[in-house]
Image (cartoon, rainbow, N blue to C red):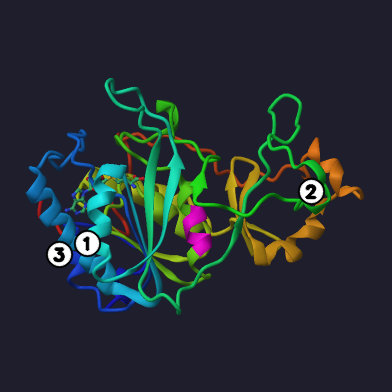
Amino acid sequence: MIEKYKNRVIQGDCLEILGDIPNNSIDVTFADPPFNLNKKYKSTKDSLNLNKYLDWCKLWINEMVRITKPTGSIFLHNIPKWLTYYTAILNESAHFKHWISWDAPTSPMGKSLQPSHYGILFYTKELKKNKFYEIRYPHKRCRNCGYLHKDYGGKKKLLHPFGPLLSDVWTDIHRIKHNKYRDDHPCQLPVHLLERIILMSTDEGDIVFDPFLGTGTTALAAKRLGRNYIGVELDKEYVRISENKLAMEKSDSKIDDVWVGFFLDKIITIRDIDWEKIAPSFIIPEMITDIDHKEIMSKNGKINKGYEPQKIDFQDLPLFANAILLEKK
Ligand SMILES: C[S@@+](CC[C@H](N)C(=O)[O-])C[C@H]1O[C@@H](n2cnc3c(N)ncnc32)[C@H](O)[C@@H]1O
């Protein structure tokens, strides 16, 4: 049943496809649904009344939980307002693990605090069986002088050469700001955000499902990391962009046979358990305290996987080759 959808982008209504996915068959479900903020998507209206929006959310959230394996995780990305409702739905059938605060400033709204983060809810299908890997990210440093932002005082000798363990506040991944880097989509997420989520919660060969694929971010991250994906998106043009990006993508986000997350030529996400395997690839100073002013470098110099973000134009794209088109719209 699931094989026909594996590593495919499906153009259609997510509820229809979700209904065709067996119970307990997906390793990780991730959703970045319409925000109901009147965003200009190509095919859907993003302005339902409150109750209609929430009733609809309840349907696909419950389906996400149903199809997730007992070892699996459910991630929901949205603005905090909608996440407060989503927690109430998820608390009925899944287990709260984290509210990840993704630091991403927006414009001041007036008469309120300036919204400066998106939330990513992290729920598990079952508490004890859940697959989870601790993540490390590079130390934060002054761009000009290279010194660590944080003062570790007398604890410098205990510094990890690569960087600290990840907390539930993510400040090192930025939204895609420049139009030249983004597709013609109002809320495309950065691929390395999804790579971090996937490294944290899956193994090679696992299946990641995204019911609101947009222009393919989750599928790209899964493919780069040797995972399988299933993505659903209502809009044909977004599906076409996803397909074209996926066709150009390789499963090679690795260093020494270890899957890692890159941003440009820098490794920005590793699993803690993989550090021993990849450490020999780095030049690590004899005095570990020296890393307070100098980042560790790869022995092979800068590694460029060709992952630069780039905008894909709507015009002149080839026709669909691998997508499943339900042709309803
Ligand atoms: C917030 S965006 C997701 C963006 C995506 N994370 C990315 O990085 O490109 C929500 C997407 O859901 C799609 N959508 C809206 N209703 C849908 C439905 N019922 N089924 C499938 N996709 C839908 C919209 O067209 C839009 O592209």
For label 3, the SS is helix
Would residue 196 be counted in the magenta stretch? Answer: yes
Of the two numbered discs 2 and 3 on the same chain, state the one appearing first in sequence: 3
| Camera-nearest residue between 38 and 168 | 168
Where disc 1 sits, the SS reads helix
| Label 1 beta carbon within 8 A of ligand 1 | no
- Residue range in magenta is 195-200
Q: Residue at x 36, y 36 (%)?
A: 183
Q: Position of residue 36 (x, y in %)?
A: 18, 41
Secondary structure of the residue carrying tag 2 is helix
Cα distance, mark 3 to mark 1? 20 Å
**Reading the chain from its start, which is encountered first: label 2 or label 1?**
1
User: Residue flagged by tag 3: what amino acid is it?
Assistant: Glu
Would you say the residues marked 3 and 1 are in contact, meaning their CB atoms lie under 8 Å apart?
A: no
Residue sitting at x 85%, y 44%: 289
Residue placed under numbered mark 2 in the picture: 155
Which residue position is annotated with label 3?
16
Q: Which residue is situated farthest in the front direction here?
A: 154
Q: Is residue 285 left or right of residue 34?
A: right
Q: How far apart, in angstroms, are the residues tagged by discs 2 and 3?
A: 54 Å
Tell me the CA gap for discs 2 and 1.
43 Å
Disc ID at residue 89: 1
